[in-house]
Image (cartoon, rainbow, N blue to C red):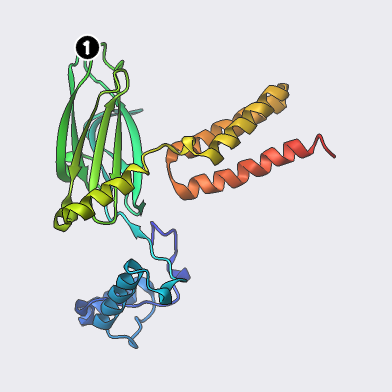
C-alpha cells in the first residue's frame, strides 16, 4: 500500500489468492490489516488459474484480450555496492539501487559512479538484489571488473546500466567515461530456462531501451524550447525559465516514466503560457 500510495480507506475489496489463504489465521490477519472481511465468492486456487489464463492469453495476443493491459514490475530493487557519502558521514559497502522495486519492466536504467582512491587502476562492480541499505545484507547476483586510468580519487567515472526484462534476464553494462571502454555481464536468474533464440530476442529488445530519456525527440524539443525562451528573456523571466529547465532535467534524470510524463505536461503548459503572452 505504501508503494501504491493508497490508504486502507481507499481499498474497496480484498481478494485472497493462493490455497494457503484458506488458513483462518491468514484470513484473520487480512481482516485486521484492511479493516474489512476478505471476499469469499472466489476460490483462492481458481483466482490463480484465472490470472495464469489471462497472462497466457496476453502472451499469445488473443483477440479477446485486446482491451486488457497487464504490466510486469520488478519485485526487488537491484543495484551495486558503492561508497555513499552523506551529510552525517560515509557509508562503505552501501547498496545503491539502479532499478528500484515496482519499476515497470522491461526497462533500462543508468547511474554514475567514480573512483574512491588515488591511482586506482580498476573498479569491481558487484551486483545485488534487495532492499537493505548495506549491500552485504542483500542477495549477491554477480560481479565484473573493469580497468580505469590512474588518476586522483573521484576523477575517473563509470556509467553502470541495468537492463531488465520480463523473463528475469538482467544485462549489466559498465562503461569508463574517459576511455569509452565497456564490459558487460548477463545475469540470467529466471531466464535460465530460455532457449537460445528467446534469449537472443530478449537481449535484442533490451538493446532498444538503452538510451537516456534526454535523448528522446519529445524531450529534446522541450529542452530546445526552454533554451529559446531563456535566450529571449531577461531578468526574473530568464530565472523562471532556468528553473523550468532545471526541474525538467531533474525529472529526466529520475528515468521514471510517470515522473517524466508529468513533467512534460507541466513544462509544455508553462512554455505555451510564456509564448502566448507575446501573441495575444
| Pointer 1 local density, CA inside 10 Å: few below 14, some 14–19, many at least 20 | some
User: Is residue 22 rendered to the left or right of residue 55?
Assistant: left
User: Is residue 14 rendered to the left or right of residue 246?
Assistant: left
Q: Is residue 279 above or below residue 87?
A: below
At 32% across and 42% down in the image, what residue appears?
Answer: 207
The image quadrant of residue 92 is: top left
Q: Is residue 157 above or below residue 97?
A: above
At 43% across and 46% down in the image, what residue appears?
Answer: 256
Q: Is residue 194 above or below residue 122?
A: below
Taking depth in this image into account, of 105 and 120 the one nearest to the observer is 105
Taking depth in this image into account, of 93 and 54 the one nearest to the observer is 54
The x, y position of residue 276, in whole percent, is 78, 39
Can you identify the residue that label 1 sits on?
150
User: Is residue 109 rendered to the left or right of residue 195?
Assistant: right
Taking depth in this image into account, of 176 and 89 the one nearest to the observer is 176
Q: Tell me if I can see residue 24 in this picture.
A: yes
The x, y position of residue 212, in whole percent, is 42, 36
Q: Tell me if I can see residue 28 in this picture.
A: no
The x, y position of residue 147, in whole percent, is 19, 21
Q: Residue furthest front?
A: 197
Secondary structure beneath dot 1 equals loop
The x, y position of residue 37, in whole percent, is 36, 82
Number of marks in the rendered image:
1
The N terminus lies in which quarter of the figure?
A: bottom left
At 45% across and 71% down in the image, what residue appears?
Answer: 66
Q: Residue furthest right?
A: 280
At 44% across and 58% down in the image, what residue appears?
Answer: 5
Amino acid at each position: 500500500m505504501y508503494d501504491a500510495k493508497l490508504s486502507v480507506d481507499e481499498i474497496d475489496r480484498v481478494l485472497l489468492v493462493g490455497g494457503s489463504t484458506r488458513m483462518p489465521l491468514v484470513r484473520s490477519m487480512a481482516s485486521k490489516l484492511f479493516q474489512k472481511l476478505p471476499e469469499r465468492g472466489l476460490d483462492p486456487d481458481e483466482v490463480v488459474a484465472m490470472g495464469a489464463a489471462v497472462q497466457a492469453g496476453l502472451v499469445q495476443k488473443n483477440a479477446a484480450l485486446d482491451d486488457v493491459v497487464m504490466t510486469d514490475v520488478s519485485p526487488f530493487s537491484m543495484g551495486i555496492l558503492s561508497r555513499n557519502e552523506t551529510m552525517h558521514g560515509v557509508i562503505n559497502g552501501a547498496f545503491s539501487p539502479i532499478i528500484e522495486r515496482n519499476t515497470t519492466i522491461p526497462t533500462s536504467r543508468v547511474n554514475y559512479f567514480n573512483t574512491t582512491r588515488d591511482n586506482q587502476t580498476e573498479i569491481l562492480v558487484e551486483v545485488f538484489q534487495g532492499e537493505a541499505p548495506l549491500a552485504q545484507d542483500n542477495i549477491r547476483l554477480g560481479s565484473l571488473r573493469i580497468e580505469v586510468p590512474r588518476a586522483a580519487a573521484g576523477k575517473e567515472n563509470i556509467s553502470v546500466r541495468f537492463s531488465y526484462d520480463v523473463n528475469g534476464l538482467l544485462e549489466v553494462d559498465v562503461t569508463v567515461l574517459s576511455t569509452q571502454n565497456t564490459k558487460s555481464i548477463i545475469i540470467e536468474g529466471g531466464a535460465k530456462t530460455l532457449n537460445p533464440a528467446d534469449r537472443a530476442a530478449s537481449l535484442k529488445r533490451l538493446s532498444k531501451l538503452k538510451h537516456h530519456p534526454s535523448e528522446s525527440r519529445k524531450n529534446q524539443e522541450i529542452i530546445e524550447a526552454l533554451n529559446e525562451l531563456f535566450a529571449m528573456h531577461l531578468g526574473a523571466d530568464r530565472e523562471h525559465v532556468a528553473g523550468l529547465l532545471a526541474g525538467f532535467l531533474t525529472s529526466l534524470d529520475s528515468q521514471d516514466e510517470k515522473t517524466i510524463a508529468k513533467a512534460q505536461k507541466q513544462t509544455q503548459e508553462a512554455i505555451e503560457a510564456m509564448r502566448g503572452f507575446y501573441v495575444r
